[in-house]
Image (cartoon, rainbow, N blue to C red):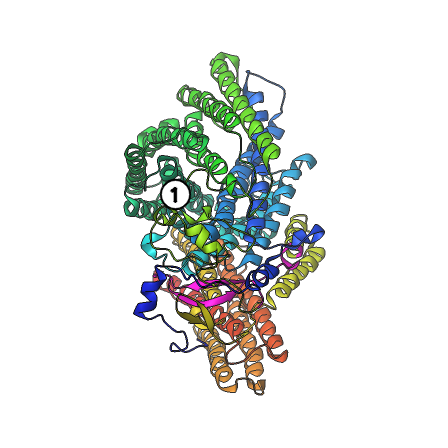
Amino acid sequence: MTVADDQRHKPTAEQKRKRTYPNTVPRPEDELPKLREPWVPPQGWRIFSAVNNTYVGLAYIAVGLIIFVLAGVLAVLMRTQLAVPENTLIGHTLYNQLFTMHGTMMMFLFAVPIVEAFGILLLPNILGTRELPFPRLSAYALWIYTFGGLAFFFSLFFGIAPDGGWFMYTPLTDSRFSPGVNADIWLLGIGFIEIAAIAGAVEIIVGFAKTRAPGMSIDKIPIFAWAMLIFALMIVFAFPALILGTVLLEIERAFGWPFFMAEKGGDPLLWQHLFWFFGHPEVYIIFIPAAGIVSMIIPAMAQTPLVGHRLVILALIAMGVLSFGLWVHHMYATGLPQLSLGFFSGASMSVAIASGIQVFAWIATIASGRLRATTPALFVVAFLIVFTIGGVTGVMVASVPFDWQVHDTYFVVAHFHYVLVGGMVLPVLAAIYYWYPTVSRKPLSERVGKWVFWLFVIGLNVAFFPMHITGLMGMPRRVYTYLAVMEWDLLNMISTIGAYMMATAIALLIFDILRNFQFSFSENVGNIWNAGTLEWMRTYTYGTRSIPEVDSRYPLWSRPKLSDETDEGRYYLPGTLTGKREALITGPIDARPVYVMVVPGPHWGPFLAGIATTLFFYLLTFKLIMPAIFFGIVALGFVLWWIWDLDHGPLRDPAHVGGGYVLPVYMSGSANHSWWGTVSLILVAGAFFACLVFSYFFLWLVNPNAWPPAGISLPSLVWPAAAAALYLASSGAIHLGSRTLRLAGNSNQWHLRLLLVLAPVLFIAAVGVQGWAEWQTGLRPTDHSYGAMVYLFAAVQGFYACLLLVMAGFTVARSLAGKLNSVRRVTFDNTMLLWHYAAVQGLVALVILSLFPRGLG
């Protein structure tokens, strides 16, 4: 830490008592103008450089709704094709593309991003802070999502859209059966868009832990914030499995490494394990925030606190944990052992208990109050009914014998649409109507809203309920037409009518949004629902005038004048201490103020990096390697540009922020918010590596007598021992650099720079020794899955070697620029943290590759 504990003054008992009663001393006249000045939003074309959570969140939601509409149009086209038997409107090739694009866009480009967007927009106000900790990262996530998502959709118009299904099962999607770029569009296009989800997840995790209003202890955090935390943690642990799967399949397609080729020791089931380890938790990734939305709306509509607040939080946590044990739920028909099927069947059914706890809590809350028949309330009630139906059919397909009967039929299509549309889309529509008054001078029309509600909910049931019957009658999924003799035509026509009703409802909603939207911070409609949580206070570009003290779960109900009091500057940080954007960093448990964070302002880096990143991945798709490398370097340059000024150091001495606290404006080490962000990214890296280890052992068990294959001898243990020594030396050099920085301070730092040059050399040498040891045995990655996995471990460490080389160079540049010393050292600390992780990962990889094949022998 940069400031000793005795410098971070704690309030006395008398000051704590007085915090209950706001400071009534008049504020200086120039305080408010100085606070407003750094938060003035960019104008004109410079709006693309905006990073404020309100601008980014609103743009994120807008793009998400555009994707939703586009994916819905594809669904209507498919339903039109299936309305009558033997229809020739759409051929099988285009239908496969429409089917793949619809599922992919809804699951990857709408469901996850839209709830993440609501989190970015609402969490700062719900948590009572001015901004989330990494606004430029959120902006970068927005732009790669926007450019990547729209480019993905427009592939339809060039005949190169993915056509292997949104699940992309191997071997149908390897280069032998899908030789074009269609599958590559999916693998590289979707793969890099997942970066946006992970970036948003890191923002949400650190924001939840470190940027809550003083007094908002664990027991007072609103349910939506809890839901977003669990959502973000699930992204951290689930999405790396999908990213690894796409990496494996793309490498197999591009270079012939046989991860999924059975004739060379691979196994197509590995793809299913990786995909569904992501895919089934994703159902809960999108449901848990939707449940959080419902838990916010019902108390406001019933004008009573949520019943069973703590039980609902525990239920959300239980759902998040249990969901990772359900992925085989989708693989019952693949020939897995009966014991495995029984375990996963039981886990699939047990998650219904956590869902039931929440449903009963919502019903009890409605019963304890008086629910108003507003549009948000109607959507919430419909959610309760529709999602319950989907949950019942979910328990049915969790039963192995029943699943075998309806597997790959329209019964499953009906089930997951009831779960996904009922469990996620209905709460999102409720959220739009509920929180719309926080960002507009005019609310959405209740009269139009009722039309939207009835058209959508009736259409939903008309569209999807008959599919249960068509599925039981034997209609398979993923077919573009059917014979009249099958007698499925009436039910399909009914489903198509329902789809058109839903489309009409969404068109009405978009019309109402465009007609009434008048964006405003301070002159919005306001708290028309008389809700009790902080997002309904009067806000500006900088959030609230002062950051309030929280003493209950529903502060606006317990203290009706709280909004006026914060607007008068009676609480924390009513002005600016540094002349820049600022927010409070608080403790993760008790939300006690720790230090003042200087919030990054507008910057062109995220926008330009988003463009360059999109070009990098799509040029790779078309095998334009040199242009792709160029734009990859450009993207990296823009990222380094925007982070250059983030480690600003202490801009002034500790100062009073209110409530008796005297706080510093800079801290390093584990107290710093960026340290928490780095730890979150390490969790992502660890999850990716864990999935890689799983893949290695899975293929080993598939090939127990060919691991390594015949004719290949394992390298001498001298080689991995040498690589391990180099990893340890590299990590040790960085540790020694930390001590050198602490002792050198602002003096000559040539020792530190020398160590920062030496450390990556040692790391690169370790990777080189590891790769050379395998290569000289005659092992090649294209011959067998064993060789492919061995060299993939080396390639992953090679990626970290490149990343650490860039980070070391960046740190040296900051040292040469005089921006690194014993106090101003956040950049170095984050580099050191990732460096130690990469070295430990390298050691674990060496142990696995060196010892376990020998142990099997």
Q: Nearer the viewer, residue 572 or 346?
A: 572
Query: Looking at the image, which residue is at 63% across and 20% down?
Result: 89
Secondary structure beneath dot 1 equals helix
Position in image of residue 233 (x %, y %): 41, 53
Q: Is residue 466 above or below residue 648?
A: above
Question: Which quadrant holds residue 420?
Answer: top left
Is residue 157 visible in the rendered image? The answer is: yes
Q: Is residue 630 above or below residue 768?
A: above
Identify the magenta region: 579-608
Question: Which quadrant holds residue 34?
Answer: bottom right
Position in image of residue 392 (x %, y %): 33, 30
**Marker count (numbered):** 1
- Per the image, the residue denoted by label 1 is 327
Q: Considering the image in quadrants, where does the N terminus appear?
A: bottom left
Query: Looking at the image, which residue is at 49% across and 45% down?
Result: 118
| 590 part of magenta stretch | yes
Q: Considering the image in quadrants, where does the C terminus appear?
A: bottom left
